[in-house]
Image (spheres, helix red, strand yellow):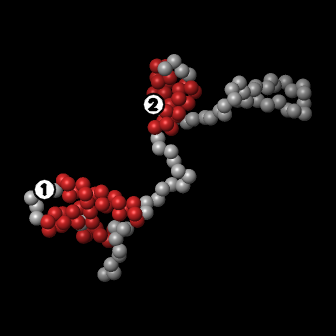
Amino acid sequence: MIEVSDFGNKDSGSPVRRRTGLDAVSAVKMPEELTSAVDAWAEAHHLTRSDAICKLVEMGLRVAPAASAAPHTATASDATRLEEIAVHEIDRLLDPALPPGERERRIRRLTEGPAEFSHERIDLPKHEP
């Protein structure tokens, strides 16, 4: 705990503890298993727990893609592109000996799903009963 003396009272009995480092102090709440794993990693790399957490976070941030300012929301063009990729992959996996009509039926069945679930699809127009 960092104690701060009363500036108005110079005879304050409690000593002032000053931060020794220049970096901000952050508390991290981790499950016991994760703490044990971090401690084992720290020991293997001859680091303190604090330095190990810092190194592991730095490594994770280098590997993880940078987050954009606003979260990416799927657009219609994203959905169209994903469907094109799916159709291409399904077509590649289908037996080349199938007649073209059967190939189309199978691709449509896999990309659109069963008719009984079409009312659940948010990307398809709703048909009034």
The quarter holding residue 98 reads: bottom left
Q: Nearer the viewer, residue 97 or 120?
A: 97
Question: In the figure, is residue 2 to the left or right of 83?
Answer: right
Q: Which mark is residue 33?
A: 2
Q: Secondary structure at mark 1?
A: loop
Q: Nearer the viewer, residue 27 or 55?
A: 55
- Image quarter hosting the C terminus: bottom left
**Residue 119: horizontal and vertical position, in percent?**
32, 71
Q: Nearer the viewer, residue 67 or 88?
A: 88
Q: Secondary structure at mark 2?
A: helix
Question: In the figure, is residue 56 to the left or right of 116?
Answer: right
Q: Residue at x 50, y 38 (%)?
A: 61
**Residue 18: horizontal and vertical position, in percent?**
75, 26
Give the Cα distance between marks 1 and 2.
49 Å
Question: In the figure, is residue 38 to the left or right of 87?
Answer: right
Q: Residue at x 35, y 63 (%)?
A: 80
Q: Residue at x 26, y 60 (%)?
A: 87
Question: In the figure, is residue 127 to the left or right of 4?
Answer: left
> Type of residue at label 1?
Asp
Residue found at the far left of this picture? 97
Q: Is residue 90 above or below residue 100?
A: above
Q: Which mark is residue 103?
A: none
Q: Which residue is mark 1?
A: 95
Q: Residues within 10 Å of mark 2 (few under 14, many from 20)?
A: few
- Image quarter hosting the N terminus: top right
Residue 36 visible to an observer of this rendering: no
Q: Is residue 39 above or below residue 67?
A: above
> Type of residue at label 2?
Glu
Residue 1 visible to an observer of this rendering: yes
Mark nearer the viewer, 1 or 2: 1
Q: Residue at x 53, y 33 (%)?
A: 58
**Residue 75: horizontal and vertical position, in percent?**
43, 63
